[in-house]
Structures are given as structure tokens and as C-alpha cells.
Image (cartoon, rainbow, N blue to C red):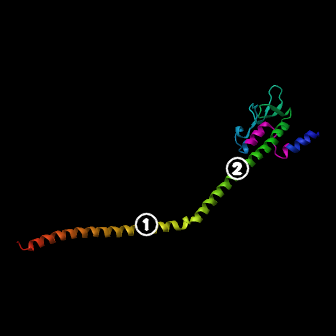
Amino acid sequence: MSSETVLSHNVYNENMIPQTIEELKEWYNDHNLPSSDVTRFYIGYDYQGSCAYGIYKKTSDNTFVVYKNKPDGTRAIRYSGDDEAIAVNELFKKMVVELKKQSQITKAIEDEEREAKQRLLANKQMFRNKYNFHQDTGLLMFVAIIVVVVITTVFSIYSSRAKRYRVDNYYYDVIQQKIDNQKKPVQ
């Protein structure tokens, strides 16, 4: 038994690491990972865009190629050879590392958003406590409405009586003058 066979057996089979491109595709789909455009891992085809990792089988000489496309458009070949299991393992290791980084970034963003929401809630609570809006607002509004209604009612009653009194007094004065004029002796 050669050292490659032992290495291959220990690395690929016991740790449940995919050995073929098809198994790697299945693993990718089984883990519900987003599309290749999001993760930048292209399994089974030669992607020419920048910032990408991938694996494919060259049809011309049946070799397996693992590549990394750099941001400047250049390509680094990480593996090129006949052993599909080694090629798949090469991309699989990089995929696990990169996906962990991406999940840590996502987790950090989620943590930051959660902290921002907590700060916002704390600020709202502090504002409410400072002005006691949540306890006294309803009672104050009710008392203010009652005071306005009472003042309006008293004012309307007083003003209508004063008008009536003035009107009645005017008519009383006019009628009294007519009566007084009739009682006066004619000279």
C-alpha cells in the first residue's frame, strides 16, 4: 500500500470529504449554499471572471484543474493533475475556509445590527423615562380635556345670559319709556 493510498483513504473517506466533482456539487447543494455568483466557487466549469475559485475537468487531456482567478484578471493554478480526489480536496479545503470567513463576516454584520437596534431601544426607553410619556400622558390629556370642556361651558352659559339680560333690559327700558310717556300729563 503506497503512502498516497493511505493519505487518500484517511483524508477523503473517514472525514466525509467529497472525492469527485459530482460529490462536491452534491455537498454544496446539501448544505443549501447560495449560488456560485455569491460564494464565488465554481464547481465543474471553467469560469473566466475575476475573484473566483473553481474546479473543472479538461476534456483535451482528462486532467483536473483547480484554479483561483485574481482580481487583476490573472489566474493561479492551485492543482493540475490526474487525481480527481486530490483536486476536489484542494478546492474543498479552500471552500471551507472561505465560507467560514463569509459566515463570520455575516455574523459580525448581524451582531452589529443587533447592537444598533438595542442602542435605539435603550435611547427610546431613556427618552420615555425622562419625560414619563408612557405613564402620565393619558391622564394629563384627560384632565386637560375636562378643564377645556368646563371652561367652555361656563363661558357659553355666562355669555348667553349676559346677552339675554342686555336684550331684556333694552326692551324693558324702551317699554318703560313708552309707559312713562303715556302717564305724563299733556301740557
Q: Residue placed farthest to the front in the image?
A: 187
**Closest to the observer: 131 or 70?**
131
What residue is pinned by disc 1? 145
First of labels 1, 2 by sequence position: 2
Query: Which mark is drawn over residue 109?
Result: 2
Image quarter (top left, top right, bottom left or bottom right) of the N terminus? top right
Residue in the picture at 12% in, 70% down: 178
Q: Is residue 20 magenta?
A: yes
Q: Note whether 93 is above or below 173 in the view shown.
A: above
Residue drawn 56% across and 66% down? Answer: 132
Where's residue 11, x and y in %? Answer: 86, 44
Q: Position of residue 137 (x, y in %)?
A: 51, 66
In the rendered view, does 141 fall on the left or right side of 164?
right
Q: Residue furthest top?
A: 60
Number of the front mark, 1 or 2 = 1
From the viewer's side, name the closer residue of 182 and 143. 182
Task: Give the amino acid type for the residue marked by disc 1 in the picture.
Answer: Ile
Residue 66: give its label.
Answer: none
Q: Amino acid at mark 2?
A: Ile
Q: Tag 2's secondary structure?
A: helix
**Region in magenta:** 12-28
